[in-house]
Amino acid sequence: MSTYIYAHRGASKKAPENTMPAFELAYQQGADGIETDVQLTKDNIPVLIHDENLRRTTNGMGFVQDYSYDELKKLDAGSWHSVNFRQTVIPTLDDLLTWNKEKQLKLNIELKNNLIEYPNIEKIVYEKIKKYQMEENTVISTFSRKSLLKMKKLKFDIATALLTSKRSRDLIETAKHLSVDGLHIRFRLLSRRLVDKAANNNLYTAVYTVNQPFSISKVIKSNCHAIITDVPDIAWSIRKKLEN
């Protein structure tokens, strides 16, 4: 089985992260899927942005949760990366799902609810995915175990994954308790033993955020289900070379 290539926040080395230009470029570069981050506005619109604070990736200040979407869409989410992306807007989850109706890429939607809980974000995101009939193509991931337990209780018919950056002897047991389908682990946690142990417990393994050619090769050679990378074009070339 080929390792799926997910573009981390889109093709985020060459376009502003978590924007439609970054997603479009990732598609053009051969990515199998898009990894993105979801937060809620003041009026409960799911928007795609990584940081809780607007400062790093827009010309705004303050927190995402304190703005309505009508206010957020006036911000420039592209110029920080390059003047070529001036006036790029923060997209909504609807924007991504609408765009993906034709493309049918795989989607890894990370709920950014480990610092700010965002009540009902699980249900809001799930209902959007159902509306666009993308359950088969989508996994919802989060660092929040509380959120994963909530999804377990709500019996979502969609794949879920536990994100982790920390070593733990109980990782497999924790994942089973949370009833997730996969582990999304930081690259430094990767070992063939963990991948095999996860597979023996019906859990897939995805690895983030992997950009160096040697590391990309290691993930693919480890038979991981997926790699999450800022450079999907490089990952695509390496995978093709290894498969040949």
Image (cartoon, rainbow, N blue to C red):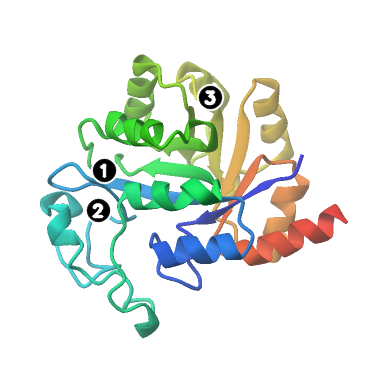
Q: Is the residue under label 2 in contact with that under label 3 (CB below 8 Å)?
A: no
Q: Which residue is mark 1?
A: 115
**Disc number placed over residue 132 in the picture, else none:** none
Q: Secondary structure at mark 2?
A: loop
Q: Residue at x 32, y 44 (%)?
A: 112
Q: Residue at x 29, y 40 (%)?
A: 113
Depth check: give the residue in front, 159 or 199: 159
Q: Is the residue under label 2 in contact with that under label 1 (CB below 8 Å)?
A: yes
Q: Which residue is mark 2?
A: 52
> In this rendering, would 171 be left or right of 144?
right
Q: Residue at x 70, y 45 (%)?
A: 3
Q: Residues within 10 Å of mark 3 (few under 14, many from 20)?
A: few
Q: CA distance from mark 3 to mark 2?
A: 29 Å
For marks 3 and 1, the one nearer the N-term is 1
Q: CA distance from mark 1 to mark 2?
A: 8 Å
The C terminus, quarter of image: bottom right
**Disc number placed over residue 170 in the picture, else none:** 3
> In this rendering, would 49 be left or right of 156?
left
Depth check: give the residue in front, 238 or 176: 238
Q: Secondary structure at mark 3?
A: loop
User: What x and y, as percent, mark residue 95?
Assistant: 35, 52
